[in-house]
Image (tube, rainbow, N blue to C red):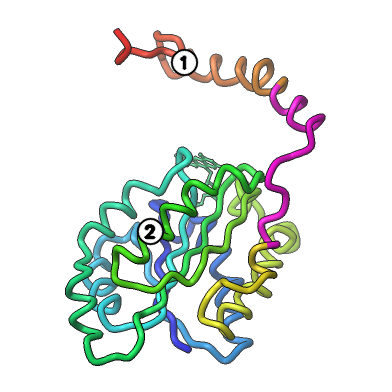
Amino acid sequence: MHALIINGSPRVKKYSNTDKILLKITAGMEESGATYEQYEVSDRSQWPKIRERFYLCDHILIALPLYVECIPGLLIEFLETLDAERKAAALENSAKRPVMSFLLQSGFAEGVQLRCGEAYLEMLADRLGCEYGGTLVKGDNFSIRLFEGEQREKITGAYQAMGKIYGRDGAFRDEACRKFTGPEVFPLPVRLLVGTIFKTLAKKGFKDKAKEWGCTRPLDDKPYLQ
Ligand SMILES: Cc1cc2nc3c(=O)[nH]c(=O)nc-3n(C[C@H](O)[C@H](O)[C@H](O)COP(=O)(O)O)c2cc1C
């Protein structure tokens, strides 16, 4: 199995958490004997090459972070440059549609906040003329790029086993991939504690920072309602 891997983060490779996760995914893929080529949408000079390979590869993995509960705008901009009909034409003589899988990761840990994005990605695969190969969904990744060595390994290490499965199956359909997400929602006491911290300490921190940066409007301003 050979996969075209696209890092959909707008952050440059050096600072991208998605990139650090992909290091583990690809190590796992190699354990399964799979090969890959990886590109970054953050580097626009790579876009023509990604497009060229998109029309030819039959396994595509798009790895992306959740940005403001959604798909990063730069990735959408890139995807809009793809031509699903051309993909279909390129594969006219092939018996199978290419398989498009996703790795959707985020800062906050609860799986539930990623489900809307996951539903969108399932539709996207079909719209791009591909068969949907599933989405590996996981949060709790805010700090990856801030750590190195053992501390980083603690957060990213488990992705290697998922990469091994992806290299074996060319998809994330295995039950182990579904379980990988962890908790859908935190238990009630944790939610209450986090909610209280956000309404007090964190809110004050955001307000102070906004003031420091010269912001004169309230942070919950709704100018478009007027
Ligand atoms: C502009 C921006 C918006 C974000 N929005 C969310 C969000 O809505 N939910 C969440 O859980 N994490 C959010 N995050 C955190 C990222 O998903 C997380 O840090 C991710 O690992 C970043 O991957 P990257 O470094 O490859 O871009 C956001 C980060 C940024 C910079």
Mark nearer the N terminus (2 vs 1): 2
Magenta highlight on residue 173: no
Image height check: is 197 above or below 65?
above
Helix, strand or loop at disc 2? helix
- Magenta region, residue range: 179-195
Q: Is residue 162 above or below residue 210?
A: below
At 70% across and 58% down in the image, what residue appears?
A: 155
> Residue 123: which quarter of the image?
bottom left
Amino acid residing under circle 1: Leu
> Quick check: is 181 in the magenta stretch?
yes
**Helix, strand or loop under label 1:** loop
In the image, is 41 to the left or to the right of 116?
Answer: left
Query: Number of numbered discs present?
Result: 2
Residue drawn at x 28%, y 68% as measured from the top left: 46
Outermost residue on the front side: it is 95
Q: Position of residue 117 (x, y in %)?
A: 47, 49
Q: Which residue is under mark 1?
A: 219
Quarter of the image holding residue 98?
A: bottom left
Q: Amino acid at mark 2?
A: Met
Image x and y of residue 118, in percent: 49, 54
Q: Quadrant of the C terminus?
A: top left
Where's residue 114, x and y in %?
54, 48
Q: Position of residue 208 (x, y in %)?
A: 55, 15
- Residue 123's mark? 2
